Image (spheres, rainbow, N blue to C red):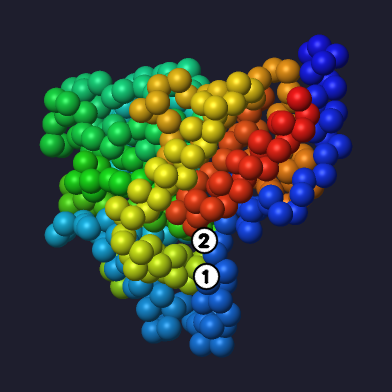
C-alpha cells in the first residue's frame, strides 16, 4: 500500500461518526442476524407458559406447529410437501442428507465455503461414491449439468461466504428419480422460490428468519420422503438416530423433535414467520430484500472506491451483498470504525480474505437502516479522502 493509502486508512480509524447519521439498529450481520424487538417481546410473553416447560406437551408442540404451518404458508407448499426439523443446524443436515437422501452419488456445485463443506462431507462418507463436483471461482456461479450417473444434485441458493445467488430450478434433462437438494440457509424466507423445483429445501433459523442457531429445517418433497424411507428400510449402512431423516419426519409430524430443541429459538422463529406472512408473505420479503440490496449495489456503482465482488449482476445476492473496497483503503479500517459506533458484522467471510465489506439485507433489515448505513459509509469515505 502507498503512503497515501495508509493515510486514508488511518484517517478512517480515527473518525467520529455523527450520531445523527447512525442507523436505528446497527446489526447487519449475515448470521446470526438481527432479531427484531417484537420477537424478543414474544419471547418475554412466552416466558411463563412456554419457556421452561416440557417439549412433549402442548405449549411447546404448539410453537413447533406454528413454525411448520407458518412455513407451509410462506412457501405456498403443495399437497404432499412436508416441513421437517431437527437439531444441529444446516451443518447437521449435510450429514442427514449424506446418510439418508443421497443413495450412491451426488453432484455438487461448489462456489464458496458452505457449498464446499457439503461436497467434502459427501466425499468423506464411506458408503457414497466420490461426488461429481462442478466448481466456480469465488464470486462466480456454477451451473448444474444433467448427469445420468448421480441420484442427487446439490447447491446453495445463496452462497453466504461470497454473496453469489443461484436459481432454484431442476437441471434441464434431470430425471424424476434424481433429487435436488438446496442449501437455502441464508436465502430461505428472503428470496422467492418455487418449492416444486427442489426435493429438500433446507435452512437454519439464524439467517433470514432472524432467530437463533441450532436447528435445521427442511421442506421435503414426496420424492425425498420416499427416498429417505427406502434408504432407511434397506438398512445398508448405520444411520445414527440423531441424523436419521425418517426419525425426524416421524417426530415432525407430531410437532416434536427427537431430542430437546432450543425452545426460545422456536419462539423467535414462529414470531418472525408470522410477521412475514402478515406483511405479505414471501413475495413481500423478496421485494424488500431486492430493494435493500439494490440500494447497496446502486451505491457501489456511484462510489469509485467500491465494486460489487460478484461480476454478474444476475448472480448478485439480494440478501448478502459483498462489496470490494479499492486497495487504497484498508477495509478493516472501515469495519472497525463502524463497529466502534455500534454498526457491526459487516466484515467479509473470514476465510475469503478479501478487502471487502459484506452486508446482510435480510427481511428484518428495513430500507431506512440501509439508507443510514450508506450515509455512514459515504461519510467515512468522504472524510478520509
Ligand atoms: C450459515 C450457513 C450454513 C451453516 O449453518 P449452521 O446452522 O451454522 O450449521 C450452511 N450453509 C449456508 C449457505 C449458510 O449460510
**CB of mark 1 near ligand 1 (< 8 Å):** no
Q: Disc 1 and disc 2: Cα gap in Å?
A: 8 Å
Residue 212: percent from left, percent from top: 55, 60
The furthest residue to the top: 2
Q: Secondary structure at mark 2?
A: loop
The numbered mark at residue 242 is none
Residue 151: percent from left, percent from top: 23, 32
> Which residue is label 1 attached to?
39
Q: Note whether 252 is above or below 131 in the view shown.
A: below
Instruction: Mark yes or no: residue 247 visible.
Output: no
Which residue is drawn at the image coordinates 71% and 31% (left, top)?
A: 381
Q: Note whether 235 is above or below 356 in the view shown.
A: below
Which residue is drawn at the image coordinates 77% and 49% (left, top)?
A: 18
Q: Is residue 349 left or right of residue 170?
A: right
Cβ atoms under marks 1 and 2 closer than 8 Å: yes
Quadrant showing the N terminus: top right
> Which residue is label 2 attached to?
211
- Graded by Cα atoms within 10 Å as few (under 14), some (14 to 19) or many (20 or more), the crowding at tag 2 reads many
Quadrant showing the C terminus: top right
Q: Secondary structure at mark 1?
A: helix
Amino acid at each position: 500500500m502507498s503512503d497515501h493509502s495508509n493515510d486514508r486508512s488511518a484517517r478512517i480509524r480515527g473518525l467520529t461518526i455523527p450520531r445523527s447519521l447512525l442507523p436505528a439498529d446497527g446489526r447487519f450481520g449475515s448470521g446470526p442476524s438481527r432479531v427484531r424487538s417484537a420477537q424478543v417481546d414474544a419471547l418475554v410473553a412466552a416466558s411463563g407458559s412456554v419457556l421452561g416447560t416440557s417439549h412433549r406437551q402442548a405449549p411447546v408442540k404448539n410453537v413447533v406447529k406454528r413454525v411448520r404451518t407458518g412455513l407451509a404458508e410462506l412457501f405456498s407448499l403443495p399437497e404432499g410437501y412436508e416441513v421437517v426439523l431437527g437439531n444441529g443446524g444446516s451443518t447437521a443436515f449435510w450429514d442427514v442428507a449424506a446418510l439418508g437422501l443421497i443413495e450412491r452419488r451426488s453432484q455438487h456445485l461448489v462456489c464458496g465455503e458452505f457449498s464446499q463443506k457439503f461436497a467434502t462431507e459427501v466425499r468423506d462418507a464411506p458408503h457414497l461414491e466420490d461426488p461429481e463436483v462442478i466448481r466456480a471461482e469465488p464470486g462466480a456461479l456454477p451451473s448444474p449439468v444433467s448427469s445420468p450417473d448421480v441420484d442427487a444434485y446439490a447447491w446453495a441458493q445463496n452462497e453466504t461466504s461470497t454473496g453469489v445467488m443461484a436459481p432454484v430450478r431442476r437441471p434441464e434433462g434431470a430425471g424424476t428419480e434424481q433429487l435436488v437438494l438446496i442449501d437455502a440457509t441464508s436465502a430461505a424466507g428472503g428470496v422467492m422460490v418455487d418449492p416444486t423445483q427442489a426435493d429438500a429445501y433446507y435452512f437454519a433459523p439464524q439467517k433470514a428468519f432472524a432467530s437463533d442457531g441450532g436447528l435445521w429445517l427442511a421442506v421435503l418433497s414426496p420424492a425425498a420422503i420416499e427416498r429417505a424411507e427406502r434408504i432407511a428400510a434397506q438398512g445398508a449402512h448405520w444411520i445414527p438416530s440423531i441424523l436419521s431423516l425418517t426419525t425426524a419426519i416421524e417426530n415432525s409430524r407430531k410437532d416434536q423433535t427427537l431430542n430437546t430443541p432450543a425452545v426460545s429459538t422456536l419462539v423467535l422463529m414462529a414470531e418472525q414467520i408470522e410477521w412475514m406472512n402478515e406483511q405479505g408473505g414471501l413475495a413481500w420479503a423478496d421485494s424488500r430484500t431486492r430493494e435493500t440490496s439494490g440500494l447497496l449495489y446502486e451505491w457501489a456503482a456511484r462510489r469509485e472506491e467500491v465494486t460489487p465482488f460478484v461480476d454478474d449482476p444476475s448472480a448478485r445476492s439480494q440478501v448478502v451483498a459483498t462489496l470490494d473496497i479499492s486497495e487504497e483503503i484498508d477495509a478493516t479500517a472501515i469495519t472497525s470504525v463502524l463497529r466502534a459506533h455500534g454498526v457491526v458484522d459487516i466484515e467479509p467471510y473470514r476465510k475469503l480474505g478479501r478487502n471487502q465489506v459484506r452486508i446482510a439485507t435480510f427481511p428484518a433489515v428495513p430500507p431506512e437502516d440501509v439508507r443510514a448505513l450508506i450515509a455512514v459509509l459515504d461519510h467515512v469515505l468522504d472524510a478520509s479522502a
